[in-house]
Amino acid sequence: MDRFASNTLRTLGIVAVSIVVIIGSLALLLLALCAGMFGGIGGLGSSSHHDPQTVKVFYGSILAAVVLVIIGVLSIAKLAKGIVRESTALPAPQAESQSLPLAPSVTHDVAAHLSPASRSAIHTLVLALAAQIGHARNAPET
C-alpha cells in the first residue's frame, strides 16, 4: 500500500477512535451521573443509606470511562507513531556502484509530504480564510 493511502487510513482511524472514545466516555459518565442522582450518592437524596448495586454502577461506570479514555489515547498514539515513522523512513538504498560519501540524513517535516489532493484542499482553505479576513476588514462597523 502506498504511503499516502496508509497515512490516510491511519488518520481516519484516529478520527474514528476519537469519536468512539468521546461518545463512549460521555455515555458512561452520564450513566454514572444518573446512578449517582437516583441512588442518592450525589448528596441530593435524603436517605443516608445507599443501595450497594447503585454504588457499584456509579463507580463501575466511572472506572470504565477512565479505562476507555486510556485505551483510546494509547491506540491514537500508536496510530500517530505509524504516521511519523512512515513519513521519516529513508528510501531504499541504491546499488553500491557509486563510491560517493554518504550525506547526513535530513529529517523531513510531516507537512511536507502531502498528496496533491491535500495540497489543493489546503490552498482552497487558505483562499477562503483570506477572503473571510478581507471581508471582515472591509465590513462597516455597526
Image (cartoon, rainbow, N blue to C red):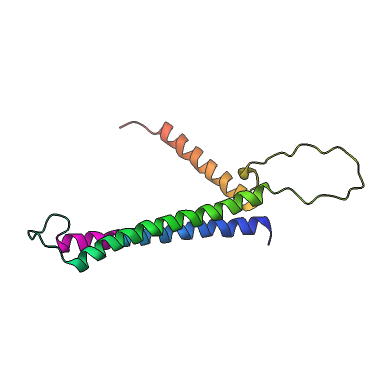
Q: What percent of the width, then of the height, locates residue 82?
A: 60, 54
Among the 4 quarters of the image, the one containing residue 71: bottom left
Q: Nearer the viewer, residue 93 or 13?
A: 93
Image quadrant in which the N terminus is located = bottom right
> In the drawing, does residue 68 fall left or right of residue 6?
left
Image quadrant in which the C terminus is located = top left
Q: Main secondary structure of the magenta part?
A: helix
Q: What percent of the width, then of the height, locates residue 60?
A: 30, 63
Most extreme residue toward the bottom, as rendered? 53
| Residue shown at 39% from the left, 58% from the top | 67
Q: Is residue 57 magenta?
A: no
Q: Nearer the viewer, residue 61 or 113?
A: 61
Point out the stretch of residues depicted in magenta: 29-40
**For residue 125, above or below residue 28:** above
> In the drawing, does residue 59 fall left or right of residue 124?
left
Q: What percent of the width, then of the height, locates residue 38?
A: 16, 63
Whether residue 115 is visible: no
| Residue shown at 63% from the left, 41% from the top | 109
